[in-house]
Structures are given as C-alpha cells and as structure tokens.
Amino acid sequence: MMDNYMALIYTIIFNKLSRMYSKEDIEECVSDVFFEVFHYRSRIDLQKGSIKAFLAVVAKRKAIDMYRKNKNHHHVPIDDVSQGLYTAEDHVEHAILLKESNSELIDAINSLGEPDSEIILRRYYLRQSSKDISKNIGLKVNTIDKKVSRCIQKLSKLLGGII
C-alpha cells in the first residue's frame, strides 16, 4: 500500500503543510496516516469507496489536525529562542528552502510535457477529480488515472524520491 500511495499521501500533506512545516514534519504526518490506516484496517469498508479515496481523506484530515493543533505554536522550542539558538535568519533560510523546493516541483511537473503536466496540475493543485479532468481535456477517466500514477512515479525519480 505504501509503494502505491506514498506519493499521493505525501502530495496531499505537502500541499496543506509545506508553508509552515519542515520536510521531516511532513514525513512524520505521512507516517501517521499509514499507521492510522493500519491500526483501523479492520474497520475499513471498501464498499463505500476505494482504498485510494480512503487514504486521501485520512491524509487530508491528519494534515488539517496537525495544522490546527500547531497553528498557534511556534515550531522552535522557547528555550532555543531564549538561548539565541534560533534567529530571524533561520526563518529566511526556511522560507528560501521552501520556495526552492516548490520551484523544483513546478519545474519537474512542467518537464512532463502536455497533457501530463496539465493533468497533474489539475489533480493536485486544482483538486479536480479524474472525471472532471477527463471532461476538460478529452481523455478517458481510466487514462487519466494511469497517467497520474505514471507521472507521480516520474516525478518521484526526477525529484530524488521526495514525493
């Protein structure tokens, strides 16, 4: 399950948390999703939807929970700030690293070419369903799903496995 859906879960959580959290925090949230799914595996009813949809919902909820839980808390311990271990430059460095990683992701998506880049942007940035994408670009729904899966694999290779 992790091999098939890690990129999807990471992307969902990254889109929700990347402006506030480090890569390690995001990866921890991804791990929490798989732990929760494993823990409650006997309660999953696949008659209500696919495992992919279930994982996506759990990922979105975990990201929202993490955001809500920590939105009013600074991610650096107070002791580190008071001891001068954390500076304004650290904020700037973190912002620059996030901007660079977002830029790398956009460049990698654009390198996929059309219609793949459009499909990925519509799916993960515009949050359109395969059915909606299918209507907009004139490909079959199953073709969209296959392209998404293959594109995520390509992106993972291009970005060194971070998605």
Image (tube, helix red, strand yellow):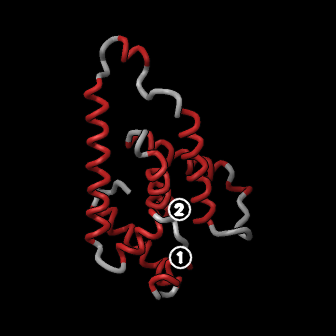
Q: Is residue 84 above or below residue 160?
A: above
Q: Position of residue 78 (x, y in %)?
A: 43, 17
Badge 1 or badge 2: first in the primary sequence: 2
Q: Is residue 89 left or right of residue 115?
A: left
User: In the image, what residue occupies the spot 56% across and 79% down?
Assistant: 131
Residue type at mark 2? Answer: Met
Q: Is residue 115 above or below residue 6?
A: below
Residue type at mark 1? Answer: Ser
Count neighbours of disc 2 (C-alpha within 10 A) and say few if under 14, some if 14 to 19, many if 20 or more: few
Q: Is residue 41 above or below residue 141?
A: above
Q: Position of residue 40 (x, y in %)?
A: 69, 51
Label 2: which residue?
1
User: In the image, what residue occupies the spot 32% across and 45% down?
Assistant: 98
Q: Is 3 or 10 nearer to us in this picture?
A: 10
User: In the image, what residue occupies the spot 73% across and 68% down?
Assistant: 48
| Proximity of marks 1 and 2: CB atoms separated by less than 8 Å | no
Label 1: which residue?
130
Figure quadrant of the C terminus: bottom left
Q: Is residue 30 left or right of residue 79?
A: right
Q: Position of residue 157 (x, y in %)?
A: 29, 63
Residue 30 badge: none
> In which quadrant of the rendered view does residue 45 lie?
bottom right
Residue at the farthest top position: 83
Q: Is 142 or 84 nearer to us in this picture?
A: 84
User: In the image, what residue occupies the spot 48% across and 65% down?
Assistant: 126
Check disc 1 and report its element: helix, strand or loop: helix
Using the numbered discs, state the Cα–Cα distance from disc 1 to disc 2 in whole angstroms.
21 Å
Check disc 2 and report its element: helix, strand or loop: loop
